[in-house]
Image: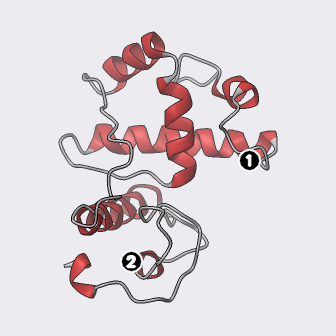
Amino acid sequence: MSALISIDLLEAARRSDDFPKDLDDDQVRATIGRYEQFLLLVAKHPGVPLAPTREIDAVWHLHMLRPRAYHDDCMRLLGYLLDHDGGFGKEPEELPVLQRTFLRTAKLWEEAYGERYLPEVSADDMIKCWHNCQSRCWHACKSQVDASATA
């Protein structure tokens, strides 16, 4: 268990039917660490919408499955319950908003932690992604998406 999160998210990942099974324990621990960094970024930027990567989102879901712990951890870390708008970005009119939010998150992450938000993919690659994954994937797509979506 970490100092930030009051439940054992590694054990929760092991027990989950939905959590990716292709990750070993070290990779899951690293992902949990990135989720904690995401929460700290949220705390540092109150009121600023931030978008998780797919891996961070998977851990976030595990945390929310323990509602009492999730509530208590959010209140301790943030002072409020961090809402989750699952599926945001699936509607065509939402996608540009999500893309801008994701790019903002990537910029704030790099400023805060000195590393890329998606280490293997640039933010520019993410806005060109044709996959329907709400800009939360590891694909390095080169297909063009409307460039005005990033303005």
**On the rendered structure, is 125 left or right of 27?**
left
**Mark seen at residue 127:** 2
Foreground residue, 2 or 114?
Answer: 2
The residue shown at (46%, 78%) is 129
Display colour scheme: secondary structure
Question: Disc 1 vs disc 2: which is toward the camera?
Answer: 2
Q: Is residue 147 above or below residue 118?
A: below
Marks 1 and 2, how far apart at CA? 26 Å
Q: Is residue 114 above or below residue 52?
A: below
- Local crowd at mark 2 within 10 Å, few (<14), some, or many (≥20)? many
Foreground residue, 10 or 43?
Answer: 10
Q: Quadrant of the N terminus?
A: top right
Whether label 1 touches label 2, CB < 8 Å: no
- What is the three-letter code of the residue carrying label 1? Gln
Image quadrant where residue 39 sits: top left
**SS at badge 2:** helix
Q: Position of residue 34 (x, y in %)?
A: 55, 46
**SS at badge 1:** helix
Image quadrant where residue 82 sits: top left
Q: Is residue 110 above or below residue 67?
A: below
Q: Earlier in the sequence, mark 1 or mark 2?
A: 1
- What is the three-letter code of the residue carrying label 2? Ile
- Local crowd at mark 1 within 10 Å, few (<14), some, or many (≥20)? few
Q: Position of residue 51 (x, y in %)?
A: 36, 53
Foreground residue, 136 or 43?
Answer: 136
The residue shown at (60%, 25%) is 2
Q: Position of residue 76 (x, y in %)?
A: 35, 18
The residue shown at (43%, 10%) is 68
Q: Position of residue 85 (x, y in %)?
A: 32, 41
**On the rendered structure, is 17 left or right of 84?**
right
The residue shown at (42%, 82%) is 128
Q: Which residue is mark 1?
A: 27
